[in-house]
Amino acid sequence: MNLLRSERWAAGLLLAAAALGLVIANTAIGPSLLAAQSAHLELPWLGLDLSVGHWISDGLLAIFFFIVAVELKRELVIGELNSLSKALLPAIAAVGGVIVPALVYVAFTAGTATVDGWPIPTATDIAFALGVLAVFGRWIPTRVRVFLLALAVLDDLIAILIIAFFFTSDADLAALGFAGIAIALFGAVSRLMKPRSPYILARRPQWPIMLLLTVLGVVAWYFVYRSGVHATIAGVALGLVMSRRPGGRAAHALEPWSNGIVLPLFALSAAMVPVPQVQPSQLDPAFWGILVALPVGKLVGIALAGGLGGLVARRRDTGTPLTLADLLVVGALGGVGFTVSLLMNELAFEGLPEVADEGTLAVLLGSGIAIVVSAIAVSLRSARYRRQGARSGVGGGGTFAH
């Protein structure tokens, strides 16, 4: 299980699953697998009618978003985002890393039917970005990793808000109300699991509370789905309302399942698209917008906004700004959109399956380019820090990340 908590292994599994999905979709068994993916698994007595692919993206992926929300809450309470001074620099960089890729995408698609896909290249895949940093950046200082983590968490928060507001229509307020009740009860019950709660101090069994939390979580997911809001938002809400320490334990327990099953299964499913048999000139502008916006737009946006944030920090003494070289490394890592970009691609082009396929390929290619560029940048930067450490007598620990 500890192996599946490794950032390196998580990134490797995700990449392997996406590559496998793309390969098998373009073999002789591809049509059969695509048909199976589109097959519907109905629960008519509950009003649920989802394809296998949607059970993965709407159902299982909520677990990943729950873990993201728990991490976000931890950072907001006791981590690198628990004060304005700490959050200011990564927040400015994150906003730049959203606005510039969106503008790049719009520049390619303005006046077309696919311009609404602008959110696709705005996301950063936390697991993948940290995985690349862990593999190639042994000597990168911890402050760079912390900055990347804070930026990616804020980036995902923006992505969550985009999903909630831009990909929701005709919300059922009654269902939302029931979801709100279930989420509130979930948060209240989770407090019974706090280390010094009367329930725990009385040494009562914990499994009834865990069972009740699971039931409330499923109920909340069901009503969020029925409301018309994307069902993964249920995972976000549950992670944010859960008491911090029980939430941390739950995320720790779920992380191997998320890294080992949920994310690879989603990557496999999302990447199962046939390569379009068309000339490059016949590809939709959305393909080129995503392909350029992820590796280029994210790098430029994060580096420029981070540089401006550094000027603010120096004037207001709000934290230690990164050097331009470090910001370029973080910007390159930010271009690895992958999981959340694939989800946004599904949502944005739900009614345009051919464009959705091209968008998936663009996300995979754009993220792939970002992986290569960031791996080179991180390796070069890490080597420079290693030489600096050798000259100054700094060993492999202390201020350097492993």
Image (cartoon, rainbow, N blue to C red):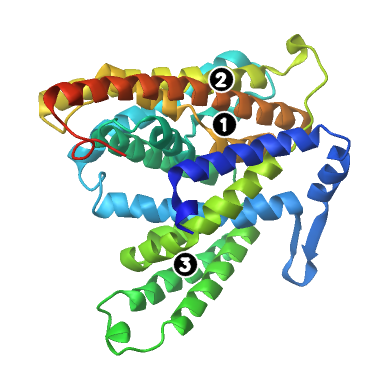
Residue 57, numbered circle: none
Residue at 20 percent of width and 45 percent of height: 83
Residue at 56 percent of width and 53 percent of height: 260
Q: Is residue 248 left or right of residue 400?
A: right
Query: 334 above or below 293?
Result: below
Closer to the eye: label 3 or 1: 1
- Label 3 is placed on what type of residue? Ile
Query: 331 above or below 199?
Result: above
Report how far apart the C-alphas of labels 2 and 3 lie in the structure. 36 Å
x and y percent of residue 51 in the render? 77, 53
x and y percent of residue 15 in the render? 59, 37
Q: Residue furthest top?
A: 281
Residue at 81 percent of width and 32 percent of height: 26
* Image quadrant containing the C terminus: top left
- The answer, for residue 347, to whether it is visible in the render is no
- The answer, for residue 204, to whether it is visible in the render is yes
Query: 68 or 8: which is nearer to us?
Result: 8
Q: Is residue 18 left or right of residue 380?
A: right
The residue singled out by tag 2 in the image is: 105
x and y percent of residue 48 in the render? 73, 63
The residue singled out by tag 1 in the image is: 120
The residue singled out by tag 3 in the image is: 183
Disc 1 element = helix
Is there CB contact under 8 Å for labels 2 and 1? yes
Report how far apart the C-alphas of labels 2 and 1 lie in the structure. 9 Å
x and y percent of residue 110 in the render? 61, 16
Report how far apart the C-alphas of labels 3 and 1 lie in the structure. 28 Å
- Label 1 is placed on what type of residue? Ile
Q: Earlier in the sequence, mark 2 or mark 1?
A: 2
Disc 2 element = helix
Query: 107 or 247: which is nearer to us?
Result: 247
Is there CB contact under 8 Å for labels 2 and 3? no
